[in-house]
Amino acid sequence: MADTDFEDKVIFIRRTAKTYKGGRRFRFGAMVVIGDRNGRVGLGLGKAKEVPVAVQKGQYVARRNLIEVPIEDPGTIPHEVHGAHGTSRVMLKPAGAGTGVIAGSVPRAIVELAGYRNLLTKELGSRNQTNVAYAVIDGLKQLRTFEESVRAREAAE
């Protein structure tokens, strides 16, 4: 796997503080998504005392958590799906050619790097960025093509 075929995008950087005798110490958490815009996408959360190190760790975790997703003809998903994580739920809905990606900032970053060009999404429940990101990945993991569904049914018989 070459490093050049993946793009990465930092979804958010979170700063946390802990108070010590001498003052506050800050730590950073970076949520990073990587993808090849061709059906492979990964999400990772990296934490460190400095932002660049947190982003680097996020990229490493995202690379370990790569998933493959099906892309239908006009650059959309095969069927509607609902992903959930914690109290966040995300609906992903296929769209016709020319619609574009209609999504919030977190789902948009993930689905665009996965390679979708026409897609509708809706964030339901909690809008916590971390949980929404994991809910989108959960939804993408549930996607099946028509051929995969037929093979699964034949295997069950």
Image (tube, helix red, strand yellow):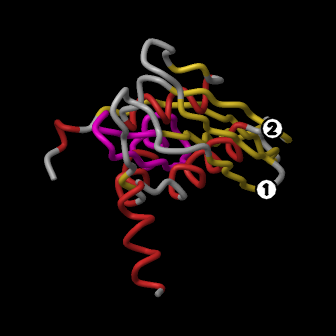
* Residue 53 at x, y percent in the picture: 43, 42
Dot 2 falls on a residue whose secondary structure is: strand
Report the residue at 46% width, 75% height from top: 153
Which circle marks residue 124 in the picture? 2
The label nearer to you, 1 versus 2, is 2
Magenta stretch containing residue 56, yes or no?
Answer: yes
- Give the magenta-colored segment's residue range: 33-57
Mark 2 crowdedness (10 Å alpha carbons): few <14, some 14-19, many ≥20: some
Q: Residue furthest top?
A: 98
User: Hey, what amino acid is under mark 1?
Assistant: Gly
Q: Which residue is at the front of the view, 12 or 65?
A: 65
Q: Which residue is at the front of the view, 118 or 49?
A: 118
Q: Is residue 72 above or below residue 104?
A: below
Report the residue at 68% width, 48% height from top: 82
* Residue 45 at x, y percent in the picture: 54, 49
Q: Could you tell whether 48 is left or right of 14 in the image?
A: left
Q: Could you tell whether 95 is left or right of 62 in the image?
A: right
* Residue 16 at x, y percent in the picture: 73, 40
User: Hey, what amino acid is under mark 2?
Assistant: Leu
> Marks 2 and 1: in contact by CB < 8 Å?
no
Question: CA separation, marks 1 and 2?
Answer: 11 Å
Dot 1 falls on a residue whose secondary structure is: loop
Q: Quadrant of residue 107?
A: top right
Which circle marks residue 86 in the picture? 1
Report the residue at 42% width, 18% height from top: 97
Q: Earlier in the sequence, mark 1 or mark 2?
A: 1
Mark 1 crowdedness (10 Å alpha carbons): few <14, some 14-19, many ≥20: few
Q: Could you tell whether 39 is left or right of 144 in the image?
A: left
Which circle marks residue 111 in the picture? none
